[in-house]
Amino acid sequence: MSVCVLSCVLFEFLFQKLCRRDVTVGDFSAVVTGMLLAFNLPVSIPLWQAMFGSLVAIVAVKQLFGGIGRNFANPALTARIVMIVSFASSMTNFATNADATSSATPLVQMGTDAMPSLLTLFLGNHGGCLGETCALALIIGFVYLLVRKVITWHTTVVFVGTVALFTLCLGQNPLEHVLSGGLLLGAIFMATDYSTTPSTKWGKVIFGFGCGLITVLIRVFGGYPEGVSFAILLMNILTPYISIWTRRKIFGGVKK
Amino acid sequence: MAIFRLSGVHVKHCKNTAKMSAVRIPVPKTVNVPMSMHIGAPARPIVKVGDEVKVGQLIGEAGAGLSAPVYSSVSGKVKKIDEMLNIAGGQIQTILIETDGLQSVDESIAPFEVSTREEFLDAIAKSGIVGLGGAGFPTLIKLKADISKIDTLLINGAECEPYITSDTRTMIDDAEAVADGIALVKKFLEIKNVVVGIEKNKPECISSMKKALSGIDGATVRSLPSVYPQGGEKVLVYHTLGRVIKEGGLPLDCGVIVMNCTTVAKISKFIRTGMPLVEKCVTVDGSAIKEPKNVIAPIGTPARDLVEFCGGFAEEPRKALYGGPMMGIALTDLSAPVLKQTNALLVFGEKEATPPPVTPCIKCGRCIDHCPFGLDPTAISKAYKANDPETLEKLKVNLCMECGCCSYVCPARRNIVQRNKMAKTMLRNFQIERKKREEAQKNG
């Protein structure tokens, strides 16, 4: 994780120096990206691969589009997707605990006897990426962000709710779907990113719904076991349109 | 009653002077009285250099149409008739009067006897009174309009801007005058209901107004949530009566006349004593002011004299404003005179006056959530930058009341409201040009 954070900050610094822009590493946004990227990687990932991911996140996704606030897609997520495609084996090799036996993410085992219990899923004692396993810790983070009014509840609640609803309709256990994989991590920390998601309340609701729908489609019918990152990325692309569709009614405005 | 509340922001109240009754400033050495302290045509000076003037003497005759007369606020000698830069950036004529310190009152000043609407309006025409909430709209024009549809007189006592307490003190110290002014307007304009809207962070004003209004039929005091900008005209009308003033409309169109509480108090004083609007209560406050006070000052008093009267500067002054911190206008220098509608002089030191560094917009959407009218400042900024007035027209930037909530909540500290103001000007120029083009086409 520290590799990711450090390399993100370093790449931002170098790129901004190179382009003679103002260096903005002091705003900690690169630190956040680095942490989020690390949360999206398995423990056993080779460090050079993590650094490559940071390069993609900061330079390709963020700085090339003009830096903070101007990127259309979430840097950490896009980096994760690039890495999944590039380093498929090391990206899906998860160590469950200190003795580093590797296992698959529970989403692969879903429906088989190897599926961990719900309590295990809640507390995080199972295979997965660095930051996606312990639902309890993620929910604590959610509450903290809500209390500090950094984010609103709309996207997250609608996202998770949609996933639960559709998996229930498709005859699967919604709780298993909610607690496993990157859903909570994505819904709480990535689908609430300001720059890449709609700014209006209703826009956030639509965004959350779309993310949930795509996640379920990929998880249940698609080739990958996990669909959260693709879902958020796809909805990122729709964000400008959602923002325009859901503009607030102007008080006293008269249509001409 | 409004079903939904319009958005707004919770600002720090900083009403440091709320407990201080207004004190009268000693007569300044000179006053500089502008001929335009209102919206509309400026007044025409009718005195010459060297003329002796007395308190309440007419020195500026109202211009044609939308205008208001100007009276001398002091007794003394006219020294100079000059032009100066007003705080909005235009050139205006001013009359500089050297005072004699006697404050002898003009002989013509006598209480009015009014018994009909015409007599009342004739009197108001001579009062020089303008909307004292800050806009300076000539009161006569408001009262002269077609009143057949008016059913409610709405008195604005919200005073939602931080620091300012001059209306607060008027409602406490001059409650009878406010009530009397309300009664006069109500009687001569035959208005059925009166609602006084006061933010609930001023319980003393609410109780004093309730007491003063107990003798007036159909008058109620409404306590408003303490959320800025409660005193914005459209916000106030919606929150007290649930009526929406449509784009391009006036309160009149939905049956309401809105007046500031100090305006009605001045109406009462004028009718009862005959003294026109020649002095104003001004809150002097801010981190750079040694002893904040509410000061009653003759119109035309330089800001510098107010500062001196309040013990001078506590620290190096960095920014001075007439009005509140949200919507007030910065002064270019301290010789700027107190105007009819000036309600506060705020002077800030280095810490408050230094703007924080601006960082890029991260599209968090807080400006959109907090805009009382539901405008989209991020889209407005983008359209302005792209020099695209047609999009600005669709975004209805013309409805922006410049309350500043967007800038206040912006985590990147961007100058959003400033950008909106420039966008409004861009749109206005575009519309004027378009009209010209269309007319030219029509004519051949």
Image: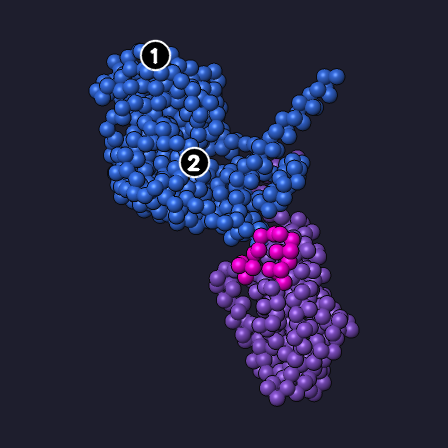
Q: Mark 1 belongs to which subunit? A: B
Where is residue B129? Give x, y as percent: 38, 24
Q: Against A234, is B222 above or below?
A: above
The answer to whether residue A152 is left or right of residue A235 is left
Q: CA distance from mark 2 to mark 1?
A: 31 Å
Image quadrant of residue A95? Answer: bottom right
Horizontal side, residue A222 vs residue B75: left or right: right
Rendered shade, chain B:
blue
Binning the other alpha carbons within 10 Å of mark 1 as few (below 14), some (14 to 19) or many (20 upward) gives: few
Residue A195 seen anywhere in this rendered image of the structure: no
* Image coords of residue A141 (percent x, y): 53, 69
Q: Amino acid at mark 1?
A: Val
* Residue denoted by label 2: B330
Label disc, if present, on residue B49 of the rendered structure: 1
Secondary structure, mark 1, is loop
Count of numbered badges drawn on the protein = 2
Q: Residue at x 64, y 30 (%)?
A: B430
Which span is picked out in magenta? A11-28
The three-letter amino acid code for the residue at tag 2 is Ala
> Residue drawn 60% across and 38% down?
B396
